[in-house]
Image (cartoon, grey):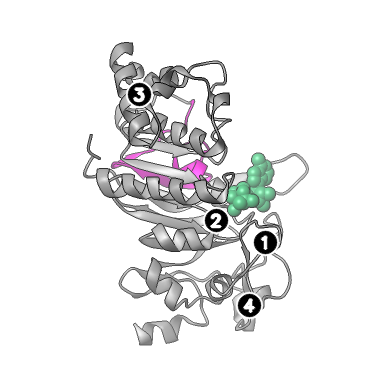
């Protein structure tokens, strides 16, 4: 099983909005460009509520874009439920935060893993054989195929969920906080399992997490989100060692939160604004230590100041380009 060579996931100027009665629309993702190449691990980080999950769901077709586009393997991703997915899009799969919710409690896990084989025209016997092989691959016993989800720990269930995704022979996996619900020892092993899949099978991985230290360990490139926009992106080591956008700087020098739920950016005044009422111009300007009056007027375009490195900041742009 090898990933399709052209199986890139490409988000272009993606905007996703939520509409609730009596409330202004919430642009939870506001004009994001992002690319995940085969075999590449892209980390998506940012504080709670910045739009990471919304972006992940739109990337696999669980939410419909308000504007912009999502393409996988050169074709637009079909929103789920509208019409049958083209076979090539079965290669785009999602791993969720809560593995239990994605498993049927009443069916043996071997059957659930084998469904993907049957869906793509194989026999149930082939599916069962593959399920045993994949359970072994994700570090579980092939004998577990005969058991039910409730018999497993959180970390084991996430391995089962990953085995089920692998049965669809994915070329790209969007993993939305796949370790957030797990205990510390399971967190590292699930993150490493996903990383191994990217390396061994050439699977592209969009790894969404508020855990900066895990992202730093496994991601090749990282995108930092703030209030629906990507403010900085680039090779992980470079962004970590030398963040340029004022928000990335604050996030990367972050302190762990007392509730264990990610990190809090340091030295920033105020809270993340309500995305139903985003600030004008640059969404970060009311909290930004280097903002000037003009930042309230125009939204900054991302500037590529070094190959593969972008930051969206009008104040820094001239200096960044000079450095680049
Ligand atoms: N179904 C919904 N209806 C209305 N607003 C929503 C809905 N789901 C999310 N939002 C809002 O969209 C914004 C982005 O939410 P999202 O869950 O994508 O962020 P996140 O970065 O993944 O946060 P978390 O890590 O807490 O899940 C938030 O302000 C959230 O309140």
Q: Secondary structure at mark 2?
A: strand
Which residue is outermost to the right? 22
| Disc on the earlier residue, 3 or 1 | 3
Across and down, in percent, residue 126 comes to 28, 16
Q: Please determine whether, in this image, residue 113 is positioned above or below residue 262.
A: above
Q: Which residue is mark 1?
A: 278
Q: Secondary structure at mark 4?
A: loop
Q: Please determine whether, in this image, residue 71 is positioned above or below residue 146.
A: below
Q: CA distance from mark 2 to mark 1?
A: 10 Å
Q: CA distance from mark 3 to mark 1?
A: 47 Å
What mark, if any, has residue 288 been given in the picture?
Answer: 4
Q: Which residues are magenta?
A: 56-81
Q: Which residue is mark 2?
A: 30
Across and down, in percent, residue 257 comes to 67, 63
Q: Which residue is mark 3?
A: 131
- Mark 3 or 1, closer to the camera: 3
Magenta segment includes 170: no
Whether label 2 touches label 1, CB < 8 Å: yes
């Amino acid at each position: 099983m090898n990933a399709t060579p052209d199986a890139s996931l490409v988000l272009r100027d993606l905007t996703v909005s939520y509409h609730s009665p009596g409330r202004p629309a919430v642009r939870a993702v506001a004009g994001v460009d992002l690319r995940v190449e085969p075999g590449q691990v892209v980390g998506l980080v940012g504080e709670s509520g910045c739009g990471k999950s919304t972006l992940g769901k739109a990337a696999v077709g669980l939410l419909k874009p308000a504007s912009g586009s999502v393409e996988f393997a050169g074709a637009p991703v079909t929103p789920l439920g509208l019409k049958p997915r083209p076979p090539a899009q079965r290669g785009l799969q999602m791993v969720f935060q809560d593995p239990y919710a994605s498993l049927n409690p009443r069916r043996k896990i071997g059957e659930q893993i084998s469904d993907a084989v049957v869906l793509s025209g194989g026999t149930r016997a082939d599916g069962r054989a593959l399920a045993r092989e994949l359970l072994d691959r994700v570090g579980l016993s092939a004998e577990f195929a005969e058991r039910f989800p409730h018999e497993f720990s959180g970390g084991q269930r996430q391995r089962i969920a990953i085995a089920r995704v692998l049965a669809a022979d994915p070329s790209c996996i969007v993993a939305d906080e796949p370790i957030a619900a797990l205990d510390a020892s399971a967190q590292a092993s699930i993150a490493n399992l996903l990383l191994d899949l990217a390396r061994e099978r050439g699977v592209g991985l969009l790894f969404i997490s508020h855990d900066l230290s895990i992202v730093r360990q496994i991601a090749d490139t990282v995108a930092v989100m703030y209030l629906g926009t990507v403010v900085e992106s680039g090779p992980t080591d470079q962004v970590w060692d030398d963040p340029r956008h004022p928000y990335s700087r604050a996030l990367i020098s972050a302190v762990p939160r007392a509730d264990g739920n990610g990190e809090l950016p340091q030295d920033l005044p105020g809270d993340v604004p309500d995305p139903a009422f985003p600030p004008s111009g640059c969404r970060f300007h009311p909290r930004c230590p280097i903002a000037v009056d003009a930042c309230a007027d125009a939204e900054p375009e991302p500037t590529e100041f070094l190959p593969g490195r972008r930051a969206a900041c009008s104040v820094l742009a001239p200096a960044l380009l000079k450095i680049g």
